[in-house]
Amino acid sequence: MWSDRTPQKQLIGIDVGGTKIAACLVDLQGRILSTIQRPTDVTEPEATLDSIAGSVKQLMDANQLDSKSIDAIGFGIPGLVDAEKGIGIASVNLGWKNIAVRAGLEARLEIPCIIDNDVRAGAKGEARFGAARGLSNFIYLNIGTGISAVILLDGKIFLGTRGLAGEIGHAVLVPDGPECKCGGRGCFEAVASGPGIAERALGKIKNGQDSILAPQGGSHLPILTAENVFEAALHHDQVAIETLEEIGKLMAYSLQYLTLAYDPEAIIIGGSVVLSNPLLFKNIQQMLRKLGRSSWVFGKAYSKDLVRLSTLGNNAGVLGAAALVAPQP
Ligand SMILES: [Zn+2]
């Protein structure tokens, strides 16, 4: 694909979210050269495709690029994606069901397009530009509003029989725990995602624990976010500190489980929940160290570098999308 023309020096990666689209021009080292953002039109699928294609055109105009100067464009899309067929199978955020995304974008842009699920794109971004550079066996665990993992074995994404490999967000972590969007109870995602963390802190307040997060004077409970809990922990709030200790332990159990199931070189954690909260990451590492000391089996795999933070941070989405179209190094 790349052989009969001069290899391109710049990549375009588009991160499509439920509220905004980020479009970036990136060099082959993963440095961001130019960015534009615009809101996602989710009124209907054709309008969504129009707004995605519009973001590409806007980026290309701003950088005086024409369709001949770009070999292909990469798109990270939320939800279930059939990358090979170029189909958005289902996305709650975009309101999509079985949409021919690649064909729709190629018709609008007249440039080859590659699409994939945004978390899988994030994993490819880490492999190409970030914390997983040089690794061929690793797991990328995204912890944000949702939780899912991407498993890379011998440099290839392992999808499983039904494409479910890595959907550990819906494995039960706390029996009979809080309700999950999937219908189950106590799933990893219901317990340890951003909303799950807020819910746990709220539970402690409901049980009468004193906290700066508790309502002052009034009787109704506050609406909390994980960010409120992180902030309160910085102010030494006991409810917030306990919540993050408990969540750190639960996350460590899941990380131990993933390690012993796949024996990866490393697990890279992406997503806002852990990246924006160093105390939570410290708790995770502490518990992993303890687990590594107490079991000689896990001890063989454990080191302080086993679980690492994403180095792409907020740019994981666009850099992951750009990695989808990066030529082989
Ligand atoms: Zn679930």
Image (cartoon, rainbow, N blue to C red):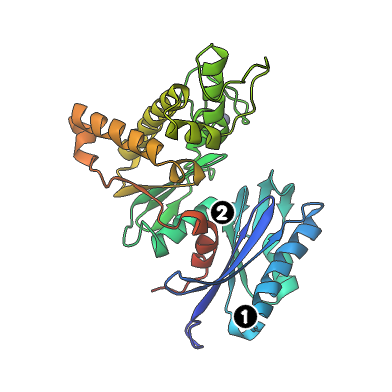
Q: Secondary structure at mark 2?
A: helix
Residue indicated by mark 2: 118
Instruction: Say if residue 1 shows up in the picture.
Output: no
Q: Earlier in the sequence, mark 1 or mark 2?
A: 1
The numbered mark at residue 63 is 1
Q: Given the image, on which type of amino acid does mark 2 rest?
A: Asp
Above or below residue 29? Residue 153 is above
Above or below residue 33? Residue 260 is above
Q: Could you tell me residue 79's position as x and y percent?
A: 62, 47
Q: Could you tell me residue 4's position as x and y percent?
A: 50, 88
Q: Quadrant of the C terminus?
A: bottom left
Q: Residues within 10 Å of mark 1 (few under 14, many from 20)?
A: few
Above or below residue 206? Residue 120 is below
Q: Could you tell me residue 284's position as x and y percent?
A: 35, 35
Q: CA distance from mark 1 to mark 2?
A: 25 Å
Q: Secondary structure at mark 1?
A: loop
Residue at position x 59%, y 84% in the image: 69
Judge from the rendering whether residue 99 lies leftward or rightward of residue 196; answer left or right: right
Does ligand 1 reach within 8 Å of label 2's beta carbon? no
Based on the displayed image, in which of its 4 quarters is residue 249 positioned?
A: top left
Q: Could you tell me residue 151's position as x and y percent?
A: 42, 48
Instruction: Say if residue 223 shows up in the picture.
Output: yes
Q: Given the image, on which type of amino acid does mark 1 rest?
A: Asn
Ligand 1 placement by image quarter: top right
